[in-house]
Amino acid sequence: MRFIPLAAPSTTRAGLVTLASVAVALALCALIFVFYGVSPAEVYSTMLRGTLGDSTGLAEVGRRTIPLLLIGSGLAIAFRAQFFNIGGEGQLLLGAVFAAGTALFVPLPGPILLPAVFIMGAVGGGLWALIAALLRRLNVNEILSTLMLNYIAVALVTYLIAGPWKGKDVRGYIYTDSFPDAANLPVIAGTQVHWPTLVLGVAVALGLQWLLSRSTFGYALRVVGENPGAARYAGISSARVMTIVALITGGAAGLAGAGEVAGIHHRLLEAGQISLGYGFTAVIVAWLARGNPALCLITAPVMGVILAGGDILKIDLNMPFRVVDVFSGVILLCLIASEVFVRNRVVWGARA
Amino acid sequence: MTQPQPNSSPPALELRGITKRFPGVVANDGVDLTVAAGEVLALLGENGAGKSTLISILYGLYQPDEGTVQLGGQTVRIGSPAEAKKLGIGLVPQHPLLVSRHSVAENLALGGGSGLFPARGVAGRVRELSEKYGLEVGPTARVSDLSPGEKQRVEIIRALLGGARVLILDEPTSVLTPQEASGLFRVMRELRADGRSLIFISHKLDEVLDVADRVTVLRRGKVVGGVPTAGATRESLAELMVGRGVDFTRKRGAAPANREVLLDVQNLTASGSRGLPALRSVGFTLGRGEVLGVAGIAGNGQSELVEVLAGLHPARGTVTLDGQPLTGGAAERFQGGVAHIPEDRIHSGTVPSMTVADNLALRGYDRFPLARGLARDLKATDERARQDVEQYSVATPGIHTHSRLLSGGNIQKLILARELHGNPRLILAVHPTYGLDIGATDQVHRVLLERTNEGAGVLLVSEDLDELLSLSDRIGVMVGGELRGPFPVGEVTRESLGLLMGGAHPHSVPGADQGVGA
Amino acid sequence: MDNIVVEALIRALAVGTPLLLACLGAIINERGGVVNLGVEGMMAVGALAAFAVASSSPDANLWLAVGASMLAGAALASLHALATVTLRANQFVSGLALALIGTGAAGLLGKKFEGLPLFNKVNDWNLGGFVINPFTVAALLLAAALAFYLNSTRSGLTLRSVGENPAAADVLGVNVGAVRIWAVLAGGSLSGLAGAFLALSYRASWADNMTAGLGWIAVALVIFVGWRPLRAVLGALFFGFLYYLQFRLQGNSPVPTEVFNAMPFILVLVVLALAGLRGQQGDAPAGLGRPYVRGER
């Protein structure tokens, strides 16, 4: 088998290859389900029925789409700059910590409390990602550093809710007191869809798309990502671009964290309850969108179905929630392995 | 032409009717070629004449579409470099392909050697070969510490270790000083005396006349002539090569006596990537409208000198342009009138995955007229691109084509168009014609000289001494981070420059003992 | 006092063993030019495979369990080899996917083994008063063997050359793809073996997420020890000691438990930053992380 580079890979080809790779991924997952001892048909039909089949399911998908959209569009930018931020999870948690701290301990008048909660959330997430950007200047691979920061963020949240921030009237549980009412987000009636965050997510996705394709910073970012040598030559500072990219991608994840605590939980609680693996799943959201923030408007709900479906499988078929990791991992692997088919055509047989 | 003698043994290597087609081009078109045992054959031709394809076929990297290869009268099929090696064909590549971190012996043991302690096993044979042919190199030395000439010797030893009877040397002198090159020629003569066949690829006509027995000339994939070197001249070979008479005279008239100083460099000192000194108190001036050539073997500080002036590398010392201190990063300096035609077109000069229009916007993408505030003006960007493509006749399917689809010459034109757009005062040009064909080379030279007529100064770094001698007003030589000269071009020759590049002191080089500075 | 020193050494060796095994595995594939960040996942499936075999019957063969772990690790690694060597995918992202698949699949398929008893565990050996685990002995011997292999054999030289300059190896007739695939499989099997140690000896049970980030630390360790097997012994011992410290200090100090839980991860960051400051990244094989395509520079 040989690969012959294509002169100009088309968008159609990219789309078809992406669809094919997702299909292969679902087939591979089916194999694992057979191993586990359930029929793949049952798994997939349960997932679809429980998510897209009724309004409750759709609302669950919508709720999970919000953080995926925010983190995913930020990651899309980061990947274009070749900044492999895998720390969306930790940045979301830090966003939640900063947001909760603001909601609980900063006495602000009602109308400006919510904006402050979001802004502080973005700051928290941005600073957490900034650590990785600064470490990268010392040649520390950001995949490793952002992953380590995830573990550290979990420990930090646990420490806060079990220690200094532990609520006064929560008895044996470990979480903080409830936020004041002014720090809680409105939801679509009967659901957990905190729509202001959803609106924010759409705005962020579109805004980042503009930034990438129309702004001077987006141009600099692409040069840094696609040819660091040319960036150096033209006097574009890779370090500066990485710093800004880290603040954007971390900030977007931080907004997601703020949205989760202000829209759903109304308090800071265990890390595993705040985020259901949004940070990792968003990696696939961004990769599926091939680095285009606007396309995350489509890919985020797709992955939202898988996350919500994981919950359904847990309840209906008593499968561990780890099934979501399997989905994410297999889809991601198939996506990146299919890249070569977008850029090359395949010739079978011996070489010329 | 040498006629095959009756009753003699068959030639060591004989190619008959070799044809190789690639989409859109016939790289080799019915090529016939023979080399006898104990003969040095020079293969001459311009870039794109089909020399590389022919070598790749001989070395098993490509299969010919038509034609046969015979070794000692036997028709052979060469399916891979490993098979070529088994058949006794060795290649000394232009750029040595060695593992820098490993020792010489480890490199030579790769792909052979004993199962245990492979490096120890080859060391003895390496010493044997280096003594026999005068190929000095220590088996335990690390490759990263070797000079280009030494690395080349390692490649020759490797070919000999593999039992090569036919040795192909691909532009072996391009990385050597003339003196190192004569050392190589001595080795080549030893090998010839030993009955081996050598194919020597070069486009330096003097060398070909010096070392080869016969010359085969390729043009546009075809053999256009084969002559013994005895009786051939530079002019006759050059005419065969390009198909018309070639002018060896200077492309530039005599320099005016007094020029206004444009660039003044004093006491420039910088360290290289490994912290070793790359520039040691370099000082010179460059006049308005002047071309200052910089010669030197790669790695003697030329790259750092250009990078420092372009704002890409920190240094101590003073640099002024038109009397004003030259400071700031690369973008600021470009805005201040410093253009930079970089050494590496693909890895720093362009972003191959971006369009021609975007590549032309690499300078000034963030300021008027290509941007308004934080937003790019894509219309203005396209408009600029159309103009540049037209003015520099860049051959491209469109301004939204990815630049990686352009040929080397057109990429270089794209870079020229971008760098010369704002009428720069100082042009830093590094190997500006490396790998280009004669047409593109001419255009690059013409454009640079035009700019000097308009008052720009050009710092021309090149490894091609002919290019330097034909364009420069003065030439300096970089050795070990120091600048020797610059000397007025009338006072230096290829030979004296070669001695300087090899580290000789100016006082010991005839014709180069006066005129430091200007 | 002596007791504490001996205890510290024993504990450090115990936690250090899976780190060392996985680190040696990663050294093999990285010296061949392929980064595999999926160690955590390969360790998890290795642990599950070992536990599944060992808990299948009271007289299950523990050798078989060990073999199963290595096979499982290599099987998962084969996906990485296919994606990165054959299909030239980004090695870092593929490794991340591998970690997700491995930990996810182990958690999913291992659910029925949670809380099950292990009939036989791999017991420590008592060597003249010095108690040592067979896995630890194996890891130490492997480190020495790998050092010898890399520096003094033809096959080791080929592996290193493929990692440093695949083009140079290619023209000499070395099958770069094949060497890299074998290196990835070998690396995966050692990660699987590290998992077997956790399931059969150290924890002697199965639980979801029992690898607890050890795989990631092993990946970082490779950089810290400069891709050298013998230094990996010291590096593993150092991190093993850290875990011991965490264990000893927990509850005995005013510092909250969570800080100790985060300590290895903070230390990895510090260690990587120090390695970066010392310019140790320069020790990385020159071809590391880049797919090899003939004719491309």
Image (cartoon, rainbow, N blue to C red):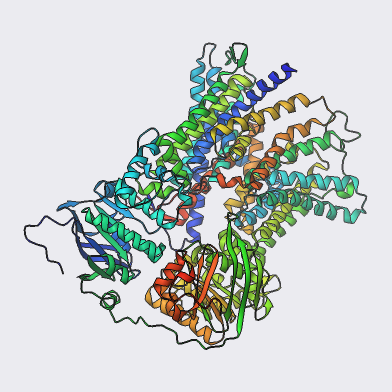
Classify the position of the C terminus of chain C by image quarter.
bottom left
Question: Residue C177, percent across and down?
Answer: 41, 43
Question: Residue A206, percent across and down?
Answer: 68, 61
Question: Residue B295, percent across and down?
Answer: 47, 70
| Relative height, residue C16 to residue B339 (above, below) | above
| Relative height, residue A309 to residue B249 (above, below) | above
Residue placed most toward the observer, C237 or B390: C237
* Residue A331 in which image quadrant: top right
Image position of B357 (left or right of A83): left
Residue placed most toward the observer, A255 or B169: B169
Residue A27 seen:
no
Residue B332 seen:
yes
* Residue C86 in which image quadrant: top left
Image position of A205 (left or right of B34): right
Question: Residue B517, percent across and down?
Answer: 56, 77
Q: Which residue is drawn at 20% across and 54% down?
A: B195
Q: Which residue is drawn at 61% across and 81% down?
A: B262
Residue placed most toward the observer, C154 or C210: C154
Q: Residue at x 24, y 59 (%)?
A: B65
* Residue B210 in which image quadrant: bottom left
| Relative height, residue B51 to residue B424 (above, below) | above
Image position of A309 (left or right of C284): right
**Residue lying furthest left in this view?**
B7
Image position of A21 (left or right of C211): left
Classify the position of the N terminus of chain C by image quarter.
top right
**How many callouts does the rendering have?**
0
**Residue lying furthest front in this view?**
B508
| Relative height, residue B100 to residue C185 (above, below) | below
